[in-house]
Amino acid sequence: MANAHTRSDGLDRRTASLTVHVCRESTLVSWARRSPVATDLVLTPEQLHRRNLKYTLADAAQPRSSLRFVPPVDVAAAVAPGDADEWRTLDRTDRLRLLEELLVDPDAEIESLRTAFGTNLAAHTEAVEAAREELDVVAGGAATRADALREVAAGLSTPAARETTALLDGLQAVELTLADRTERAVSAVPVLRAGREALAATDGRAWEEAYPTVERLSVAGVSTVGSALLDFLGHVAAFTDVEVHLFLRAGTGPRIAERLDARLAAQSSLDVDVTVASDDAGGVEPSVPAAELVATTRREEARAAMAVVDALLDRGVSVSDVAVVARDVDRYERPLDRAARRYGRHLSVWTQLDLERTLPYRLLVTCGELLDAAADSSGGGGAVDAETVFAPLDCQWVPPDADADDEAGWPLAHHEVAAVRRAVDDGEARSLDAWSRRLDDVGSGTETTVDGVRRLIQWARDQPTTPAPGEVEATFDPVVEAYDAVVLPQRLAADTPDLTETSRTARAVERSRKLLGQVRGKYADWRDRGHVVDSWGTVLDVFDAVATTRPGRREHDNAERIDVLDATDTWLREYPYVVAVGLVDGKWPERPDGAFPPAFRDAVVAGEGPAAGLGVRGAWTEERERDHFVDAVRTATEGLVLTRFTEDADGVTYHRSPLLDEFDDRGVDLPAVEGGDVADLLAADRRLPESLRRVLDVEVAE
């Protein structure tokens, strides 16, 4: 593609030329080649999409040394002035910790958030952060878009206008206060804006210095293009000779493409030239036989899904050629696991959960780091600094013998722990005994928190300094159980109605429990081979090795594990046979959701007037649900079964997903398997209905 921008003609206006590809990821894959230098930067904001793209290239045995996979914020940091380390960002966990501290005793400007969240703001830290993240996507820190937000709010009904304006006022104050309290960038937005400004100020030289060999910049696998990222991409296109491509998905892609001009024009003086290349694959028409299976309850649906899988495996299909896909794996993991056991099968559940970034996992790591430092200290090899001592408390450590009624009030409040740390942290590292004596210097009024710190120090003293494999679980399992018993109920009480954070944390707790058993086994293996010495440092190495290995990955193709995937993880994946479960209205697609009032979200999505230049968060529409559905359909290369249930355990009726209507609209044959056919499928002497035989490539006469 020839860039339309001018670089040295003396004109003030530049043209940002972008090419949008909808469901044409094959184009990106075709660019991979052998090269001594990277010529293509591929930005995949989600780690799982970066992984899937790498797997696709590996499966195709295609060299990819020309491609370099980079998070968008890292590219902007490389272009921004100064060293890239100066542009480090807070991760979400640290941001939540700081946010909770300032919400405990909020400034007057932040108090306006009470209009939306109630008087106890600290109890709604997760919801406030969700709103702040949504604002990042929509406005991207741009003053012109902030003005547009207020103009949109002013056009709403009085109650919605009041709540939206209060949110905008409070979130603006939150952003400024967070920036004052940390040396790091609060989020990726300031980094992307700094990179954008550097491109304009240097007429593109900043890019040439950072990436002299790069010819193309591609964004892939996204359902949302945040405003700050889009502004950065526009400036790359306008001020460099680099081609900029967006590889978008079936549901959200057309809307994103349609609004690119208005969104870029809202924040810059750039002219915009957008080329859209779309495949008919943007529809859901499968290229393989498909059937719809209708069960009565979710439990029966799970049994029927596993009966289909069992039938395939009985007929010699490799277990690596079958996948079960769910919009929300959490809802289906237990019924599918129960059903699989009836057939003597086992599941490997792939989940989007990034364990390393969850609080339960970080709690285990910070406890391990404290024990490692303390063991070195006791052996004369070093001392423990304040950050290491207090880190488990920042991750909501609870004494194993504590309960919800403990008068210390576990977990300790972040701001109270921070106050004690400031009182004792003189920059010196010391032994745990010395830290305990140091706490004697803390003034009155903090006795409860000081006692809590002492309990953590005593717990660390009580653990072995050179742990055997069995002592790893004995040390950490009570920590996880205490977190589950005390912290998780508090998260449930403070969560938003959709319980997103509670669900995520509960999954993290369960994964952490399983992790401990895996760590014990791997630690014992390394130890028995003489590869390592007994130490908490070694245990931490094992934690990292196990936690960063994707769950479900097989050592061999014939390993008896049936892959169960979250629909978000099907982009670019391929399996000959796919069983997609849960195609029920309200479950898949889920209803649009967000922290801002529905009327405001609807106005932004509509994109009329001042809203035309604003970004749209994927969860604000059902288009993202269609992204996942089309990805799941495209995953199947030989046969596809789509399942749903009609009522829950209480007899409440559930209706067919409107996503399935697209098959009807396109005239796609989607025979139904229901009633007696489902009973035959579940019978001890299983009989496959003819419609399933066609999908599963089974001869009519057995």
Image: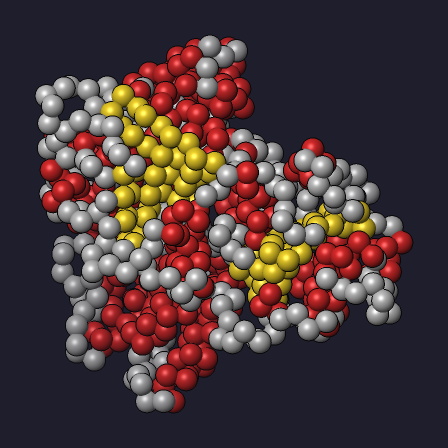
Q: Foreground: 689 or 580? A: 689
Where's residue 269, x and y in %?
23, 19
Residue ID at (22%, 27%): 5
- In which quadrant of the rendered image does the N terminus lie? top left
Q: Foreground: 546 or 7? A: 7
Left or right of 454? Residue 247 is right
Residue ID at (45%, 43%): 24
Where's residue 548, x and y in %?
39, 64
Whether residue 387 is visible here, answered yes or no, is no
Where's residue 606, x and y in %?
50, 20
Where's residue 168, x and y in %?
38, 22
Residue ID at (41%, 54%): 53
Q: Is residue 582 above or below residue 362?
A: above
Q: Foreground: 336 or 334? A: 336
Q: How is the image coloured?
A: secondary structure
How many numbered marks are there? 0
Left or right of 496? Residue 295 is right
- The extreme right residue here reads 676
Q: Is residue 628 above or below residue 114?
A: below
- In which quadrant of the rendered image does the C terminus lie? bottom right
- The extreme front residue here reads 2
Whether residue 148 is visible here, answered yes or no, is yes
Name which quarter of the figure residue 585 lies in.
top right
Q: Is residue 512 above or below residue 43?
A: below
Residue ID at (39%, 52%): 29
